[in-house]
Image (cartoon, grey):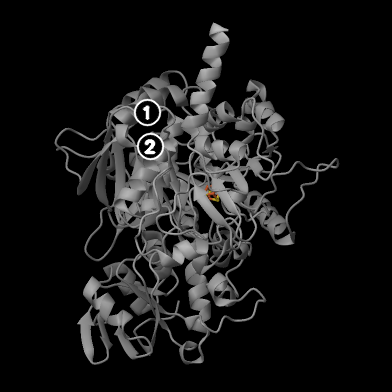
Amino acid sequence: MDKFTSIQSKVVVLNIENIDTDQIIGSDHLKITDKKGLGKHLFADWRYLENAQPNPDFVLNQADNASSQVLVAGDNFGCGSSREHAPWALLDFGIKVVISSSIADIFSNNAFKNGLLPIKVSKQQHDFLLAHHGDEISIDLQNQRISCADQPFSFEVEAFSRYCLLNGLEQLDFLLGQMPQIKQYEKKYSKEPV
Amino acid sequence: MVATLFEKVWDQHYVCQETEETPAVLYIDTHLIHEVTSPQAFQMLRDNNLKLRRPDRTFATCDHSTPTTKPNSLGEYQFFGEQEKNQVEQLKKNCAEFSVPLYELGNQKQGIVHVIGPERGITQPGQTIVCGDSHTSTHGAFGALAFGIGTSEVGYTFATQCILQRKPKTFGIEINGALSSGVTAKDIILAIIRQIGIGGATGHVIEYFGSTIDELSMDERMTICNMSIEAGAKAGMIAPDQTTFDFLEGKEFVPKGKDWDIAVSGWKELYTDDGAQFDRRILIDASKIEPMITYGTNPQMGIKIGEVIPSNNETQALKYMGLEEQQNLSGKSVDVVFIGSCTNSRISDLREAAKIFKDRKVAQHVRALIVPGSHEIKQQAENEGIANVFISAGAEWREPGCSMCLGMNGDIIQDKQFCVSTSNRNFEGRQGKGGRTLLASPLTAAAAAVTGRVTDPRELLARNDAITEACEHG
Ligand code: SF4
């Protein structure tokens, strides 16, 4: 996995609460058996009109935002289905950071494992960022700092996920390193393979 | 030391405790998989030259992309498209390559993953259970710690039988009092989600307890735990009791004979000790709950049937739904009724629905689709004569699967159609692009099917009672 250290980008704001993973990537696109090419289906129901043409009113279709890597979304982002296709689609589209006042557990877990950084901020910081659509933002994972419109603030992030992102490590490798302990556990609880 | 049910199960499953730097390594007893969220995880094994460590603790079924129509005379299943077919075939190949037992299409044990786990006794109290599916919370009804994971974690579980987890917080929901007639487990959970909100339990494992829960059957407990995720919870749990043991005894995968007794005596220790503290706790009065229905685009947007839609500034949701604030849903014409999904496709759900369908017809303008959760349930419903009640009423009686819960297999509703559905999500487009989902219990769904409108099922149940009485006195 690529290392994730810092990002500088424009903010794209999608101020809708409870954006569920069905909305991020519809079940029509869960039929693949690899992880590729989901970006074009990201938010498809909102992004495309009946005739499959891009909806000019949808924020990600506007030329200014097309290259934004930081999505600030309404509260409780990523709720619902456990589909990892949601972070795959966001990443494939070019989004590297999602910020909200609350992010659903499974989505967060899935995001970290693919190199997408989910950031939970306070209500106040969230309101501030929601008001800065199109502004430059910088995100420094090493120092856990966000800066937008000359306003710096710090954010919390789960220590292990941060470590893996900063060093480009796969969480799987850590788990594989625990194999002796795992086998010991199985022995202790009589859960060994028969 | 006193502990909650969750803590007891957690403590029996961590391989390494969490530290500030690293999450806990949590051992997984049972791994359930299906065709949609597993292919990339199998590929990860191949890419890293890894073995699937515990095929003996891994169980596969296909349910999401599968057709709910019968195979043709040559025994061929009519998939919606090549992709669906390919996904199911891929699962078959993967399971064969990695020696994972698979309940494939046509197998009499096949069904929705969260239905067949308990049905076969794969699901047991005190286990940790994961599946690449958010409604894995269903299995918590047995006192298991069960939750949904993403595809990366499916791969980690394949490779190590463990995942990395920060210890979640606990949330106690005490529910006391008797349910009035016509009120079901689905109404309880919809009322709870309305109260705490769709993100209200994020980061928490819920434990449901209290006199109302004690009285519920396993099917009903599963309905409640199933929708814990709709309040954002990591998992939902209910302490196992005699109802649980009676349900499980004799099932295929549970211990037998002396081993059964030993297992039960261990399971009896799985409860929240007096004095153990939850991080959060609420109390619900079950006697105040009435049949519920949702009006919006997430499960927290629910009301009692007969209440008006609140003025909560849910403009986008109401626009999508074609509804208005202060509108009464009662009497609203509906186009489709779906009875099925891992929330409400069990035999007791079908029996409830049949009470309403009996001696009635599906309204002319309504399409009613009834999809049992598994072959075993389908068979049972046919043996009990319930299936005939549905068929005589004019409903479509289908083969088991997820079906219209997420519409991956082609069972979908059309743009702007209203569907009263016993599933768990009313998200935009979930049942078909532009489709409008009203979540409700099997009783309410059945009532909508026969009247063609959103109807309080108690009206029809009362008429049933009146007819029975008239016959008895006649
Ligand atoms: S029935 Fe619906 S919620 Fe349940 S597993 Fe299938 S798609 Fe998911």
Sequence order check: which comes first, mark 1 or mark 2?
A: 1
Chain under numbered label 1: B
> Is A162 situated above or below B431?
below
Residue type, numbered disc 1: Ser
Q: Residue at x 53, y 73 (%)?
A: A46
Q: Is residue B108 left or right of residue B461?
A: right
Q: Is residue A189 left or right of residue B343?
A: left
Q: Which residue is mark 2?
A: B290
Label 1 packing within 10 angstroms: few (<14), some (14-19), many (20+): some
Q: Residue at x 36, y 60 (%)?
A: A105
Residue positioned most to the right: B74
Q: Is mark 2 within 8 Å of ligand 1?
A: no
Q: Helix or strand or loop: what does disc 2 sit on?
A: loop
> Is B327 situated above or below B355?
below
Residue closest to the eye, A57 or B310: B310
> Is B29 situated above or below A39?
above
Label 2 packing within 10 angstroms: few (<14), some (14-19), many (20+): many
> CA separation, marks 1 and 2?
8 Å
Residue closest to the eye, B96 or B350: B350
Q: Are marks 1 and 2 in contact (CB under 8 Å)?
A: yes
Residue type, numbered disc 2: Glu
Q: Helix or strand or loop: what does disc 1 sit on?
A: loop
Circle number at residue B391: none
The x, y position of residue A52, in whole percent, is: 65, 76
> Number of numbered discs present?
2
Chain under numbered label 2: B
Q: Which residue is mark 1?
A: B180
Does the rendering let one see residue B145?
A: no
Does the rendering let one see residue A117?
A: yes
Q: Is residue A35 left or right of residue A81?
A: right
Q: Residue at x 46, y 25 (%)?
A: B247
Q: Is mark 1 within 8 Å of ligand 1?
A: no
